């Protein structure tokens, strides 16, 4: 019976510029035996093309259409929602702008002209940008964010991610941002389920974060597999209210289940 595997990237396949040991071999075996493989990253700092190159450098041969990230899922979703003249103002980095442009979404540089404000991880986040997003909200623009992750694991320790910027904006408006494209949203689930085209019981989500990877899999009745190579400690893995079906030290142990 064919299985579908959805792999998170940061903290699961690699940490910063270092591959997780055994990741390439494991993926090779899965593909050899005919299972479907999808890569799903919430990280908005890289294009799908960048991710493909990064995986290739680690010896992982991924097809372009096997690679999904939050920028891509957000763009697919927004493209469907936008009316003809709608414009978006973007708080994010270049790969996000590029992905929106790939989907022919109109980007405005004037927040007062925006129908939607797209919020993402932005390493040049400033008070001016916070104020601009707030002004757009005041005149009725809708927020949509790429991903809810508070931090992103790296080889030098966790980095504040899109969730930190969402927090700053929510602090100003007093309203929670509901529309978030990446894991664990139903927006992401629908896109990936369609791509896998397999019964939910044959789908496996492999990731390092309980609130995104594991929550999404559990909610959607995929098998959930937590790996301890990223943001989640063994202690947290067994004490958290979100319970994975399996806990592995690393993706290297995946073939044992
Ligand atoms: Mg991760």
Image: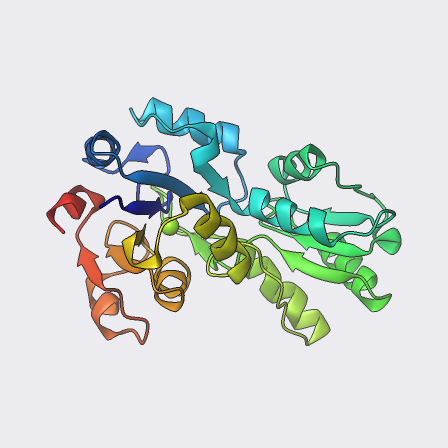
For the point 87% across and 65% down, which residue is it? 139
State the image coordinates of residue 70 (x, y, percent, origin top left).
54, 47
Considering depth in this image, is 234 or 70 the residue closer to the camera?
A: 70
State the image coordinates of residue 64 (x, y, percent, origin top left).
47, 29
For the point 69% across and 52% down, which residue is it? 118
For the point 57% across and 47% down, which residue is it? 73
Considering depth in this image, is 104 or 21 the residue closer to the camera?
A: 104
Please tell me whether residue 145 is drawn above or below residue 176 in the rendered image.
Answer: above
The count of marks equals: 0
How is the model colour-coded? rainbow
- Evaluate whether residue 206 shows in this view: yes
For the point 68% across and 39% down, which residue is it? 100
- Evaluate whether residue 126 shows in this view: no
In this image, 47 relative to 101: left or right? left
In this image, 191 relative to 179: left or right? left
Please tell me whether residue 53 is drawn above or below residue 17 in the rendered image.
Answer: above
Considering depth in this image, is 138 or 123 the residue closer to the camera?
A: 138
Considering depth in this image, is 6 or 182 the residue closer to the camera?
A: 6
Please tell me whether residue 95 is drawn above or below residue 207 in the rendered image.
Answer: above
State the image coordinates of residue 148 (x, y, percent, origin top left).
52, 60
């Amino acid at each position: 019976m064919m299985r579908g595997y959805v792999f998170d990237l940061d903290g699961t396949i690699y940490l910063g510029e270092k591959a997780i040991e055994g990741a390439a071999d494991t993926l090779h075996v899965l593909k050899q035996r005919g299972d479907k493989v999808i890569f799903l990253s919430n990280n908005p700092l890289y294009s799908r093309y960048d991710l493909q190159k990064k995986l290739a450098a680690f010896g992982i041969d991924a097809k372009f259409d096997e690679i999904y990230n939050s920028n891509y899922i957000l763009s697919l979703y927004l493209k469907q929602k936008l009316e003809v003249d709608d414009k978006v103002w973007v708080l994010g980095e270049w790969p996000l702008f590029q992905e929106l442009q790939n989907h022919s979404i109109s980007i405005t540089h004037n927040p007062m002209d925006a129908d939607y404000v797209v919020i993402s991880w932005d390493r040049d986040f400033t008070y001016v940008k916070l104020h601009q997003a707030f002004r757009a909200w005041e005149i009725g623009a809708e927020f949509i964010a790429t991903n809810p992750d508070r931090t992103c694991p790296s080889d030098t320790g966790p980095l504040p991610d899109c969730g930190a910027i969402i927090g700053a904006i929510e602090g100003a408006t007093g309203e929670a941002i509901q529309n978030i494209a990446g894991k664990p949203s139903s927006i992401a689930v629908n896109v990936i389920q369609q791509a896998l085209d397999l019964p939910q019981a044959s789908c496996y989500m492999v990731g390092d974060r309980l609130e995104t990877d594991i929550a999404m899999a559990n909610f959607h009745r995929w098998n959930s597999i937590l790996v301890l190579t990223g943001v989640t400690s063994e202690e947290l893995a067994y004490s958290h209210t979100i319970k994975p079906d399996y806990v592995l030290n690393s993706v290297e142990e995946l073939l044992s289940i």
